[in-house]
């Protein structure tokens, strides 16, 4: 009996479908690439620099935190790199280096690790970091000011800000097709609606993000923007504009769908997304801030645990 | 075996293999030199031993370790007791392993033959040891209120074809078995469930025949209860408490054979799944060490491989190749270490894949947080732990590779134990 080969007694199931966390992170990064590449083409090397610095510093913050907290090193799962990439996509191409590094610190350490690491973050780390930066250094997210030295082939006017300050007429001066192909100022990776939609479609079909959240977020924006527009077409821009301008598509595809801060049951996902869309339009149209996506996502993150209580009754549950 | 769709939107769908899709005729592994029987151990320190090394046993003999032993094991071979040693199984179960050196020919036990002439309640403990392991204890228990017997003509787990094969080839035995079961238990309502496409040729059985779906986990008892009998098993209850007893088709066929021949049927059918996932039907004897069967099919075992009693989703790994084939062993599966699913230390990231996979809509993402913290009572109360039908799909799809299924089984075991302790203290 003792000459036998030693067997491992592990637990069932002995098969696994092979999906891994790493794969998820890398596929989301892949899906973000089309929009990022359009951003690189528009803004050139400064944009490349911001993205590279953001990804690198995010990974280093994560590694540093792992070392300080004496945890196993988790940079291999791609989650830090993904956070870095998504954060950079929201920045203007001229973001100063210190702001990038502060942003990744806020996302990785404040947004994720002090809550307990991956899976425990109550808020989307990227949205949280951007919100803190926006409140602390307002001018960094004033795209008209940040991109003033660029000589672009399209109207270098941040559409959302224009609509906010000058009403629907300013919004009407933007051609929707131009907005869709990325001919608008904004974050490095948030301008090209078609690129984002392409990535989003890929992620939804592959099951890496939950389509319910993404689509209901867009529907929420469309419907509430339409209602505002119908009430006062002079003051409020149309739904198509709201869908394609600013952070909308990026938020719907990459921010609202972040795993640990979003619900998992069907009806809560729909409510969560729709509430996000509604909040965004409310902040944009009657709120104080220029773009409401980031703050709207933080708000829906906050109600997520409550929403997830709406769930189907387990079969066999004894009441 | 593992086909993954490029599209990840849909929930995972795994089909049971239908015979004869991949299976060939069963091959016989001849009776080995030694066979091992597992006797459920009961502590009785001062009782005089009834069995000692050197005793001879006959096929079909009821073996008790001491007088008034409530537990017993039925010998499946004829020979001399060579060794007796303690043996521990899953979840703290203890057995006495009785190793028997096998003589060439079966000598059948008189008492068994006497009882096997006609269905007689006294035959019940003997029947519990025949291939298929019928749950005679439950069926014959005067306190139980079993009204329906469901014969599993489809196997629980993926790749396993044992009971399917029995239904396909042994209908005459099943028919006799059904008749004997009715005589023995007085239960008239008998249902045979099968995954076969056509229900022709089952008319004469004396049982209603129902078909079940072919998607995993449609063949699990709880799913059959829900889909075929239209009865949902409430959390914390068993099918038996609802008056339904499940029995393997193999067991029914064995009962049929027993009362037909008056002897203990010695051939045990099982599905052997090799490292490539190729299933093969094997006819062997209860008590045969697993290692002998693997040797016969030249399946090489390396360090750290898994040897599993049962199938890929719900089987249980054993620690020794000397582990014997038991009456209810439907399958033996061998998985290479490099291909076996490994657990990881990652926390739940709330991706929701388990929610979509769960056939009974348990909030697995919340449940697992409580289970990881060891808060089993909360888990049962608030997050439907006891609704789990133990299909293993949540672990199968978990991207963090959390051993959710094992957590659930452990939690149920611990709750059970706590309850037993409470009851005995009062």
Image (tube, rainbow, N blue to C red):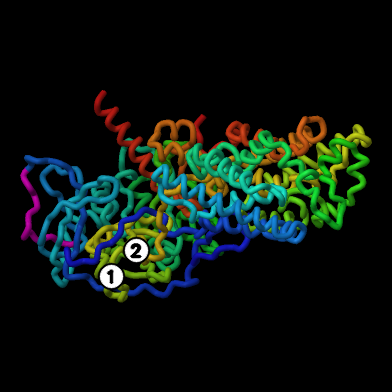
Magenta segment boundaries in residue numbering: B48-59
- Residue marked by disc 1: B293
Q: Which image quadrant is residue B422 in?
A: top left
Q: Is residue B309 above or below residue B45?
A: below
Q: Which residue lies furthest to the front in this view?
A: A149
Residue depicted at 87% across the width and 51% down the height: A155
- Local crowd at mark 2 within 10 Å, few (<14), some, or many (≥20)? many
Residue depicted at 46% across the width and 36% down the height: B235
Residue B171 in picture, x, y percent from top left = 42, 64
Q: Which image quadrant is residue A293 in?
A: top right
Residue depicted at 42% across the width and 52% down the height: B344
**Residue A99 placement, left or right of B269:** right
What is the chain letter for disc 1? B
Q: Which residue lies furthest to the top in this view?
A: B426
Chief SS of the magenta region: loop
Judged from the image, the secondary structure of the residue bearing numbered disc 1 is helix
**Residue B12 placement, left or right of B311:** right
Judged from the image, the secondary structure of the residue bearing numbered disc 2 is strand
- Residue marked by disc 2: B332
**Residue A57 placement, left or right of B54:** right
Residue depicted at 33% across the width and 62% down the height: B306
Same chain for the residues at labels 2 and 1, yes or no?
yes
- Local crowd at mark 1 within 10 Å, few (<14), some, or many (≥20)? many
What is the chain letter for disc 2? B
Question: Is residue B198 in the magenta section?
Answer: no
């Amino acid at each position: 009996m003792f000459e036998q080969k030693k067997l491992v007694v592990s637990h069932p199931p002995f098969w696994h479908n092979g999906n891994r966390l790493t794969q998820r992170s890398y596929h989301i990064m892949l899906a973000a690439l089309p929009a990022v590449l359009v951003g690189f083409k528009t803004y050139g090397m400064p944009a490349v620099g911001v993205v590279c610095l953001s990804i690198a510093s995010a990974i280093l913050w994560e590694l540093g935190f792992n070392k300080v907290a004496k945890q196993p090193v988790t940079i291999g799962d791609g989650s830090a790199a993904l956070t870095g990439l998504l954060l950079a996509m929201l920045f203007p191409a001229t973001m100063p280096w210190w702001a990038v590094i502060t942003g990744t610190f806020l996302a990785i350490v404040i947004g994720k690790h002090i809550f307990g690491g991956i899976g425990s973050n109550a808020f989307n780390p990227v949205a949280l970091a951007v919100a803190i930066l926006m409140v602390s250094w307002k001018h960094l997210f004033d795209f008209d000011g940040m991109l003033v030295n660029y000589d672009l082939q399209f109207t270098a006017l941040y559409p959302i800000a224009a609509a906010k300050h000058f009403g629907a007429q300013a919004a009407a001066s933007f051609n929707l097709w131009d907005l869709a192909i990325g001919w608008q100022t904004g974050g490095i990776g948030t301008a090209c609606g078609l690129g984002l939609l392409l990535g989003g479609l890929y992620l939804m079909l592959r099951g890496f993000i939950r389509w319910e959240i993404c689509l209901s977020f867009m529907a929420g924006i469309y419907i509430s923007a339409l209602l505002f527009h119908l009430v006062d077409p002079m003051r409020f821009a149309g739904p198509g504009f709201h869908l394609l301008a600013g952070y909308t598509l990026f938020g719907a595809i990459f921010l609202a769908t972040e795993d640990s801060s979003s619900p998992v049951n069907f009806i809560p996902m729909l409510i969560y997304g729709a509430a996000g869309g509604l909040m965004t339009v409310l902040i944009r149209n009657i709120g104080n801030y220029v773009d409401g996506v980031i703050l709207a996502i933080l708000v829906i993150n906050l109600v997520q645990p409550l929403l997830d209580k709406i769930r189907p009754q387990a079969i066999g549950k004894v009441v | 075996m593992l086909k993954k769709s490029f599209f990840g939107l849909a929930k995972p769908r795994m089909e049971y293999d239908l015979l004869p899709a991949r299976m060939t005729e069963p091959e016989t592994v001849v009776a080995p030199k030694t066979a091992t029987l597992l006797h459920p151990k009961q502590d009785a320190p001062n009782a005089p031993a009834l069995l000692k090394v050197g005793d001879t046993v006959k096929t079909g003999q009821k073996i008790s370790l001491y007088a008034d032993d409530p537990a017993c094991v039925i010998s499946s071979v004829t020979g001399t007791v060579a060794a007796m040693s303690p043996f521990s199984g899953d979840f703290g179960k203890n057995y006495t392993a009785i190793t028997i050196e096998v003589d060439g020919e079966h000598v059948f036990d008189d008492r068994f033959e006497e009882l096997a002439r006609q269905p007689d309640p006294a035959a019940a403990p003997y029947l519990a040891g025949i291939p298929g392991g019928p749950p005679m204890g439950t069926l014959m228990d005067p306190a139980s209120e079993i009204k329906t017997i469901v014969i599993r003509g489809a196997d629980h787990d993926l790749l396993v074809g044992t009971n399917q094969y029995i239904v396909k080839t042994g209908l005459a035995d099943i028919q006799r078995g059904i008749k004997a079961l009715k005589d023995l238990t007085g239960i008239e309502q008998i249902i045979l469930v099968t995954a076969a496409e056509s229900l022709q040729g089952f008319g004469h059985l004396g049982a209603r025949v129902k078909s079940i779906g072919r998607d995993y986990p449609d063949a699990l008892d709880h799913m059959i209860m829900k889909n075929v009998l239209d009865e949902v098993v409430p959390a914390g209850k068993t099918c038996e408490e609802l008056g339904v007893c499940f029995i393997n088709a193999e067991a029914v066929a064995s009962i049929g054979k027993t009362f037909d021949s008056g002897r203990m049927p010695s051939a045990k059918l099982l599905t052997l799944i090799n490292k490539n996932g190729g299933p093969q039907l094997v006819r062997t004897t209860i008590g045969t060490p697993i290692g002998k069967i693997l040797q016969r099919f030249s399946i090489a075992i390396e360090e750290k491989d898994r040897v599993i009693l049962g199938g890929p989703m719900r089987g249980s790994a054993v620690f020794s190749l000397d582990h014997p084939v038991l009456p209810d062993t439907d399958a033996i599966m061998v998985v290479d270490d490099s291909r076996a699913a490994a657990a990881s230390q990652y926390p739940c990231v709330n991706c929701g894949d388990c929610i979509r996979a769960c056939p009974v809509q348990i909030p697995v993402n919340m449940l697992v947080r409580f289970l990881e913290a060891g808060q089993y009572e909360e888990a049962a109360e608030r997050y439907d732990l006891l609704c789990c039908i133990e299909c293993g799909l949540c672990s199968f799809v978990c991207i963090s590779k959390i051993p959710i299924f094992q957590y659930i089984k452990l939690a149920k075991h611990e709750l059970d134990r706590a309850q037993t302790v409470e009851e005995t203290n009062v």
